[in-house]
Amino acid sequence: MELITQIAISGILSVALSIIAYRLRMLTLTGALASLIVGYTVGVFGSVQWLILLVIFTSAGLAATRMDLTSKSELGLQEGNFGERTHKNVLGVGIPACVFAILYGVLHSAFGGTYDLALTIAFISTLAVAASDTVASELGIRDRRVWLITTFERVKRGTNGGVSVLGTVSSVVASAFTGGIGYLIIVGGIDVYIFVPILMGIIGNIVDSLLGATLEERGRISKYTNNCISGLVGGMLGLLIILFV
């Protein structure tokens, strides 16, 4: 695809997604603007296929946020007033994706396709981490039996670092779906490498829970920083596996 076409399509898709999400009250105005920036960056430096995967993940994540909103509101765990997400939510999961998209664009220009597969898997891994964490949080809240990941003591729903059976199973399914679909969309086939982003999504979600139970619970980092770190860890591990294993 010619660069000018890629730029145009990326702009159209990014603007359309941001406007629709804002009009449906899934994103605040700042969230929509952040979504536009993230989407455009991924589409231009990565590819339109990368952007399509990002759109699929974003749509699924926003839909999960809206599920059972009444119960979340009663527990004080909903996003915003209507489940809408702000720029902090968007950038928390979007920055890792942008980092690997930019690296992909720069290194592809400098070295051709040498690092394309590794960086593609790193990108998919960041989305698998985000999907895994989002679904674990949004669906896991329905499970009343929650344990702290560091000590396994029973804690109330919504506790930072709390894990449940429903949340864990949901996170694995979300990681498998995002990692698998992402690999098929971008790489265009099935081989052993498809398991890397799936596994990174699961590991990244565990990292998120561990950071939640420690640094986030102590106020050292916010949940948005936690999301960003977890995504970067998942993406970097995926990258290193492809390069050195």
Image: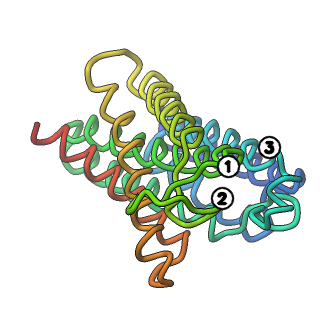
Q: Is residue 85 left or right of residue 181?
A: right
The residue that mark 3 highlights is 67
> Which residue: 37% across, 58% down?
232
Residue 178 vs residue 135, the one in the foreground = 135
Label located before the other in sequence (2 or 1): 1
Q: Secondary structure at mark 1?
A: loop
- Circles 2, 1 touching at the beta carbon (< 8 Å): yes
Of tags 2 and 3, the one toward the viewer is: 2
| Other-residue count near label 1 (Cα within 10 Å), few / some / many at <14 / 14–19 / ≥20 | some
Q: How is the image coloured?
A: rainbow
Residue 157 numbered tag? 2
Vertical arrangement, residue 26 with respect to residue 191, above or below: below
Q: What amino acid is at disc 2? A: Arg
Q: What amino acid is at disc 3? A: Met
Distance of label 1 from label 3 (alpha carbons): 17 Å
> Which residue: 68% across, 50% down?
141
Which quadrant: the C terminus? top left
Residue 144 numbered tag? 1
Q: Secondary structure at mark 2?
A: loop
Q: Secondary structure at mark 3?
A: loop
- Circles 1, 3 touching at the beta carbon (< 8 Å): no
Residue 59 numbered tag? none
Question: Which of the 4 quarters of the picture holds residue 8?
Answer: top right
Residue at the extreme front: 153
Q: What amino acid is at disc 1? A: Arg
